[in-house]
Image (spheres, rainbow, N blue to C red):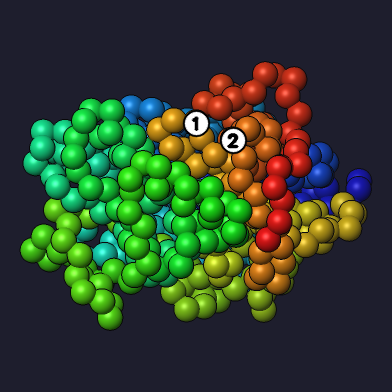
């Protein structure tokens, strides 16, 4: 028997990082005996496409996890991770089950909570109808000012730009006179992607008459958006992105805000054979592509730790964002080194393939083959192209 082949890997979570980790583990260690997925929800939901729902331009598709994981030999336990005993390599679920493991990956994500009191919190499909209602009010001439706000502490701001751009496009086509604006602590649009991407988005906002304002929003009251150290802005409706709150899991360390501290191989600091990936970790950018890159790094480290060999590559973040605009999309990309952006690009053509919103090395082709929107032909190979205008 090869070393490690009798091992059991327990993955807590049924979202983006968890699915990428399953695919990576099976590819890197085909002899791995057992992968168990522990998640409270039987479904996987592709949240990024929920921004298109208010405009009837797309849908956050869902599928049953067991349906795709069962045939791959992955066991599924429907329950939540409640506690970890790293000494005994034992996990406990909320339902009281004791699950032994040889390696544990916490891919438990984070809950989406209100960050801006008085605003509509856009957290995905559940809140798409609220935005649709605002658009109808605007079209009827009953909404003069519509603000999309990025609250302080929210690092993944792309959905606010998508909602604003798509609203601008739809309201423009319908002849509505609503003023659409973005209020964000960022000094420039989509700051995290660097100067070139920022310029491209700024140009697009301007061409659609969408105002951009750098400010820290505090709350919404009586037709106003109250700002920190600034005069309030008149606003008939404000839609804000949520703040993320990871689940509390006994036995796992937690940094400020409850996020799990990890090293560059996605090992949980201070614990042996416990790994974490995705929104639950303390890496500042909470984004699906990043979650998959962490899952890949964790899978490589797990495989090496369990004796399957290999030289695990550390997590080296690359931000990729497919910006939906209501017209042609934009592909934004940034390489990040030591917290600094070293390359920034924006393109009208796809610069990664399949051209998915969550650009996971294994997850994107896997979902494309299942017929997800933005899908690829069955013989497609994941690849990355040089984008025009690379630079800081
Ligand atoms: C509106 C919106 C638009 C977005 N757009 C984009 C985009 O364009 N591109 C992009 O890359 N990202 C985007 N994101 C972010 C992306 O969806 C997340 O970063 C990504 O889903 C994080 O993956 P994850 O696996 O960490 O968490 P999730 O995908 O949220 O999965 C977490 C999983 O853990 C499970 N879980 C929770 N608690 C427990 C527990 N105690 N035990 C076991 N399981 C548990 C949950 O049920 C879930 O299955 C967007 C997010 C939102 C809200």
- Residue wearing tag 2: 348
Report the residue at 81% width, 58% height from top: 313
x and y, in percent, of residue 15 in the image = 52, 46
In the rendered image, the vertical position of residue 78 relative to residue 304, given as above or below: above
Q: Is residue 376 left or right of residue 16?
A: right
Quadrant in which the C terminus is drawn: bottom right
Q: Is residue 225 left or right of residue 191?
A: left
* Label pair 2/1, CB-CB below 8 angstroms: yes
Callout 1 crowding tier (Cα within 10 Å): few <14, some 14–19, many ≥20: few
Mark 1, ligand 1, within 8 Å: the answer is no
x and y, in percent, of residue 391 in the image = 71, 56
x and y, in percent, of residue 23 in the image = 69, 40
Quarter location, residue 336? bottom right
Mark 1, secondary structure of its residue: loop
Closer to the chain start, of discs 2 and 1, is 1
For the question of whether residue 17 can be seen, the reply is no
Callout 2 crowding tier (Cα within 10 Å): few <14, some 14–19, many ≥20: few
Label number found at residue 328: 1
Report the residue at 10% width, 37% height from top: 141
Q: Is residue 387 left or right of residue 131?
A: right
In this view of the protein, which residue sits in the foreground, 150 or 25?
A: 150
Q: Is residue 187 left or right of residue 243?
A: right
Quarter location, residue 306? bottom right
């Amino acid at each position: 028997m090869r070393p490690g082949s009798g091992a059991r890997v327990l993955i807590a979570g049924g979202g983006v990082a968890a699915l990428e980790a399953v695919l990576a583990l099976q590819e890197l260690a085909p002899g791995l005996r057992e992968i168990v997925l522990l998640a409270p929800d039987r479904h996987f939901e592709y949240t990024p496409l929920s921004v298109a729902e208010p405009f009837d331009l797309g849908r956050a598709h869902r599928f049953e996890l067991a349906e795709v994981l069962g045939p791959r030999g992955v066991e599924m336990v429907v329950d939540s991770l409640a506690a970890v005993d790293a000494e005994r390599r034992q996990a406990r679920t909320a339902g009281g089950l004791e699950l032994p493991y040889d390696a544990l990956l916490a891919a438990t994500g984070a809950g989406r909570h209100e960050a801006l009191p008085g605003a509509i919190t856009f957290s995905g499909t559940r809140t798409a109808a609220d935005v649709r209602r605002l658009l109808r009010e605007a079209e009827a001439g009953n909404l003069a000012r519509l603000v999309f706000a990025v609250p302080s502490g929210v690092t993944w701001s792309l959905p606010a730009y998508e909602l604003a751009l798509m609203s601008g496009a739809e309201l423009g086509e319908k002849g509505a006179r609503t003023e659409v604006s973005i209020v964000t602590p960022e000094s420039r649009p989509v700051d995290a992607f660097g100067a070139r991407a920022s310029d491209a988005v700024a140009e697009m906002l301007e061409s659609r008459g969408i105002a951009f304002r750098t400010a820290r929003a505090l709350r919404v009251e009586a037709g106003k958006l109250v700002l920190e150290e600034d005069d309030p802005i008149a606003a008939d409706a404000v839609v804000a992105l949520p703040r993320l709150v990871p689940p509390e899991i006994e036995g796992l360390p937690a940094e400020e805000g409850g996020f799990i501290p990890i090293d560059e191989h996605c090992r949980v600091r201070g614990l042996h054979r416990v790994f974490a990936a995705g929104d639950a970790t303390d890496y500042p950018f909470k984004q699906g592509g990043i979650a998959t890159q962490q899952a890949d790094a964790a899978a490589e480290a797990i495989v090496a730790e369990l004796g399957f060999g290999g030289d695990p590559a550390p997590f080296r973040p690359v931000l990729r964002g497919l910006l939906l605009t209501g017209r042609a999309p934009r592909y934004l990309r940034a390489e990040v080194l030591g917290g600094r952006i070293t390359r920034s690009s924006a393109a009208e053509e796809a610069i990664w393939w399949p051209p998915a919103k969550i650009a996971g090395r294994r997850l994107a082709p896997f979902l494309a083959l299942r017929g997800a929107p933005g899908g690829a032909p069955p013989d497609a190979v994941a690849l990355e192209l040089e984008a025009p205008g690379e630079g800081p």
